[in-house]
Image (cartoon, coloured by chain):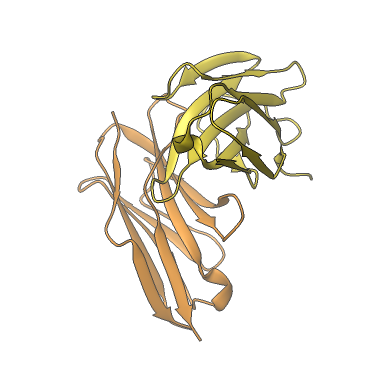
Chain colours: A orange, B yellow
Amino acid sequence: GESVGLHLPTLSVQEGDNSIINCAYSNSASDYFIWYKQESGKGPQFIIDIRSNMDKRQGQRVTVLLNKTVKHLSLQIAATQPGDSAVYFCAVAGAGSYQLTFGKGTKLSVIP
Amino acid sequence: EAGVTQSPTHLIKTRGQQVTLRCSPISGHTSVYWYQQALGLGLQFLLWYDEGEERNRGNFPPRFSGRQFPNYSSELNVNALELEDSALYLCASSLGSNSNQPQHFGDGTRLSIL
């Protein structure tokens, strides 16, 4: 089966700095990866996804990097803002599987 | 476009009771997923429905069950409630099951067991 681990349960960054949130997965056959943001009292909100045939994908102020060699996934947030304060989850699915396995989440706190 | 909607938002029950939670997916989405988010444990996969059929279930006892209706809405039923069932129950939907598609979540039902 798949397991998804996280390097840091909490992260504090200064407003305006870049944030990097990391995730590690166990199954080399995993081929779909998603990042979610969960604010207090709300459900997870889709941020960005990437498939295993790519190693980088960019969105608005966010970039996801995938290193299949070491089974590592990261989310970079540029110019972090107070509204970015939330818990961030990575989720992974295997080839042909539609079931996501979630990491435990990193709580990002932005210092004004 | 309306997102995934769940009802009720909060619920308080006592041990041994039964509960039904409801979910309406995003219009056009045929797959519905249920997750349990207990404090400090992340999201644990419960059930996956697609086109009215149960496609997979997570490592939960049989007292957790559900169904999907012809309009793709879904119910999660939990029988014989236990204290450890206290959690946020999240529903997500996605565009079918032909390829990996992002799951979009509702804001959940907060279930408290006294």
Look at 59% across and 49% down and name the residue there: A43
Judge by depth and name the residue closer to the eye, B86 or B69. B86
Determine whether, in the image, residue B63 is placed left or right of residue A92: right
Asked whether residue A75 is in view, the answer is yes
Residue found 25% across the figure and 35% down from its top: A28
Residue A66 rendering spot, x and y as whole percentages: 33, 51
Observer-nearest of A88 and A96? A88
Q: Does A16 appear above or below B84? A: below
Can residue B98 be seen here? The reply is: no
Reply above or below: B44 against A10.
above
Q: Position of residue B54 (x, y in %)?
A: 55, 15
Above or below, B52 against B34 in this view is above
Q: Residue furthest top?
A: B53
Quarter where residue A20 is shown: bottom left
Q: Residue at x 61, y 42 (%)?
A: B104
Horizontal side of A1 relative to B9 (left or right) equals left
Residue B47 x %, y %: 52, 24
Residue B50, position in %: x, y? 60, 19
**How many numbered discs, if any?**
0
Give left or right: position of B24 versus B100: right
Q: Is residue B95 left or right of residue B85?
A: right
* Rendered-image quadrant of the N terminus of chain B: top right
* Quadrant where the image shows the C terminus of chain B: top right
User: Who's the residue at 66% across and 41% down the image?
Assistant: B11
Q: Residue furthest left?
A: A70
> Residue B12 versus residue B87: which sits nearer the camera?
B12
